[in-house]
Image (cartoon, rainbow, N blue to C red):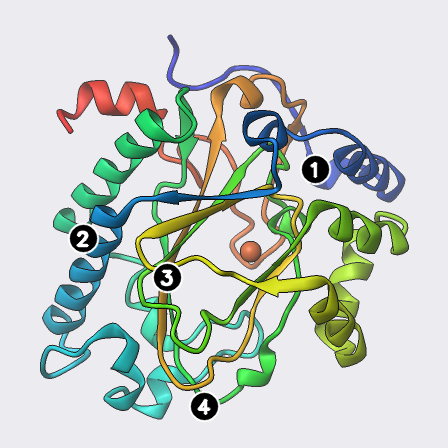
Amino acid sequence: MSMTATMTRMNINLLSPTDKQALTQNTYAKKSYFQDLFTKDQIEVNCESFSRSFQNEIERILLEKNLIEEETPLECLHEVLSDEMKAYNFDDGVNKISTYFYETDQAFMKVYHQYIQFLREHFVKEPFWFQETPTIRIHCPNARNSHHYPRYHTDIAYGHPPEEINIWLPLTDILTGHGFRTMSVSSSKSIIESFDYHYEKFINEAIHNKNFSAYCDTLSAPAPTSFGEMLAFDPRCIHTGEPLVSHTRASMDIRILPLSQYKKMTIEYQGSGRRKILFSPGNCYNIQNSDYFLENTGI
Ligand SMILES: [Fe+2]
């Protein structure tokens, strides 16, 4: 099996606005691979040993990077972090403390790769491409620029392939809520349809119109996922973070792309953010697929 695909694909940015709309309409018209696999829009899967391991790893890295002075439960981090660490950059909604996890270390990545093995054996049960670096988020209550949130979106609207599967893993207890909301595919479809399948118009409204966000609040629900479970959802589901009430939420999110779906893709997807990252092996995804990687690295 070759490690990377050789098919030539049309870059998403070369499509005309009309073709992009048609692609989006088609994405929402059909049953997704996720729905085929799980007959639902979102499912929860127990992965408690990994939740605990990731939690421990994050606490360790916080100490080793001198971001905290003594062991602190993740849900209490807001009590010891400075305002500067907690404040959100209004453009991308990322706070400084989360940026320290753009790079982790070997021990953390070992746990991540064991988690990939777990997903391969117990979740999708077929080979997949996987996000090379997981996204760690640490959201604190009362942080400056919290009004960045909610910011309803789908990752697809930011350039991700609709063939991906979103996985979100809380690393703190739910307490007063994770500050994360999701919507069903059918509600998401009705919203995207109301913008004539024009993602940019939807995103623009979600950023600038508080009334629209309030409407999305009525269609979405807080993630009910307990610590120890992971939430996997259809990538067409609109979702958002929202301000935390009184505790810090730590979470990890990744995307995986089954090879069976990747092979059928005729579009090369590319992020619309600052980095313009390509959603392809060796770029957003690990250069080796799950099976090649797990066979050759002795996990
Ligand atoms: Fe997202």
Q: Quadrant of residue 9?
A: top right
Q: Earlier in the sequence, mark 2 or mark 4?
A: 2
Q: Quadrant of residue 78?
A: bottom left
Q: Earlier in the sequence, mark 3 or mark 1?
A: 1
Q: Amino acid at mark 4?
A: Asn
Which image quarter is the C terminus in?
Answer: top left
Identify the secondary structure beneath mark 3.
strand
User: Callout 1: few (<14), some (14-19), or many (20+) C-alpha neighbours within 10 Å?
Assistant: some
Answer left or right for 279 relative to 154.
left
- Choose between 51 and 224: the one closer to the eye: 224
Which image quarter is the N terminus in?
Answer: top left
Q: Which residue is mark 4?
A: 142
Q: Position of residue 140 (x, y in %)?
A: 39, 81
Q: Which residue is mark 1?
A: 12
Q: CA distance from mark 1 to mark 4?
A: 38 Å
Q: Earlier in the sequence, mark 1 or mark 4?
A: 1
